[in-house]
Amino acid sequence: MSSHVEETSSSYIQHHLTNLTWSVDGGWNAHDAGFWTFHVDSLLVAVGLGVLFLWLFRSVAKKSTVGVPGKLQCFIEMVIDFVDENVKDTFHGKNALIAPLALTIFVWVFLMNLMDLVPVDFIPHAAKLAGVDYLKVVPTTDLNVTLGMSLSVFALIIYYTVKVKGFGGFVKELTMQPFNHWAFIPVNFLLEAVTLLAKPVSLGLRLFGNLYAGELIFILIALLGYWQLPLYFPWAVFHILIIVLQAFIFMMLTIVYLSMAHEDH
Amino acid sequence: MNINATLIGQAIAFAIFVWFCMKYVWPPLLDAIETRQKKIADGLTQAERAGKDLELAQAKAAEKLKEAKAQAAEIIDQANKRRTQIVEEAKGEAEIERNKIIAQGEAEVEAERNRAREELRQQVATLAIAGAEKIIKRSIDKEANSDIINKLVAEL
């Protein structure tokens, strides 16, 4: 791509970081089209991978046998068991939602991260040949995607806090700690509000930052011409670690936050 | 990078996926895992019990074998004793029989000898009488000296 006459390095990078958008007001790829804009590529890839995950697991679940399992069932059960163990170690209450939630987060985020290992030009270039100008294939390098998930988790945190401790308990948690005295209510509220809001923000930004930086380095390596050949491989190997680790961290922190929401202090 | 409605779309997709996973994916798979775990645990317990049973049966069999051996030894011992007894008895009987036969033989020999002696005595008497007769024919009367001859015969 860098051999292209009109294309400079910065425009190459810019092109790779631009989403395919559709907005209610401006239609396809309009600039500054306001809030009601959809990143069609992020959503399509994310939903596609989510459907792939659910289809795979559902087809195994339908054929699952109590007797000797097949190889695919063994693998799926290994993942299930891994998630189940982590949930049981951290969350001690009874909740039918948390384990499937953790499984969905782990596998889905992992699959979305995995798109990062597809060489950066393969899919965008193919899309260009098919007439699509912009295509960003790693959904987790889109801040909207990661924040969409972390804010959903945030909503669950607040829902379960209110459900377990009552609305009074929720307010009390925000205002009466760490200093249990009425005079400290403003200070407490400031501290606790920051703590509470930092949860979804850090959850979403951590995943986004890691994957965005990794993607950027892949793009920079792709700019190096023939030098990208020896460099691409080690970074990809290193990135395998990152994509699994980030998926695991997102899952683990979700479990921890939700178990904190269930616990009385 | 700006925040826009993609966030809402992602959140909706997330909610639907989690709901589907909770409803149709997680329960059957976890159920299969847990049922299998229980099955394996049961199997292990049963295997352990079977092992214990086998051990018990082996111990019982060994005991039975030992008992049978002891019994066999006792029977052989008894048989030996009985044999000795029978042999002893037979020996005693044979001894008695032998003694009887010997005694009979001796008695017969004695009787034969007595008879022979009697006969001999008779013959000697007759011979003496004949001799004396011949002597007396030559000299004296037979009757007059018969008492002397009888005395002689009696002394033989």
Image (tube, coloured by chain):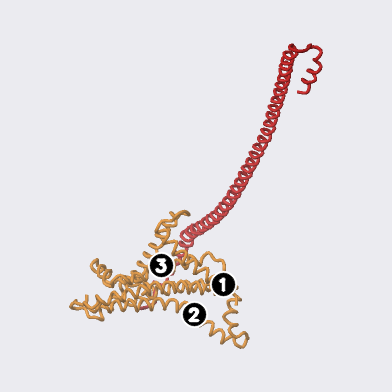
Residue A88 image point, x, y percent: 52, 68
Residue placed under numbered mark 1 in the picture: A262
The kind of residue on which mark 1 rests is His
Residue placed under numbered mark 2 in the picture: A197
Chain of the residue where label 1 is placed in the rendered structure: A
**Same-subunit check for callouts 3 and 1:** yes
Query: Between marks 3 and 1, how big is the CA–CA gap?
Result: 25 Å
Question: Tag count in the figure?
Answer: 3
Residue placed under numbered mark 3 in the picture: A108
Chain of the residue where label 2 is placed in the rendered structure: A
- In the shown orientation, is residue B83 left or right of residue A222? right
Chain A's colour is: orange
Q: Nearer the viewer, residue A110 or A86?
A: A86
Residue B86 image point, x, y percent: 65, 36
Chain of the residue where label 3 is placed in the rendered structure: A
Inspect this view and state whether residue A45 appears. Answer: yes
Residue occupying the point 58% across, 82% down: A175
Looking at the image, residue A221 lies above or below residue B55: below
Residue B140 image point, x, y percent: 78, 12
Secondary structure under badge 3? helix
Query: Between marks 3 and 2, how big is the CA–CA gap?
Result: 24 Å
- In the shown orientation, is residue A110 left or right of residue A265? left
Whichever of callouts 3 and 2 sits on the residue coming sooner in the sequence is: 3
Secondary structure under badge 2? helix
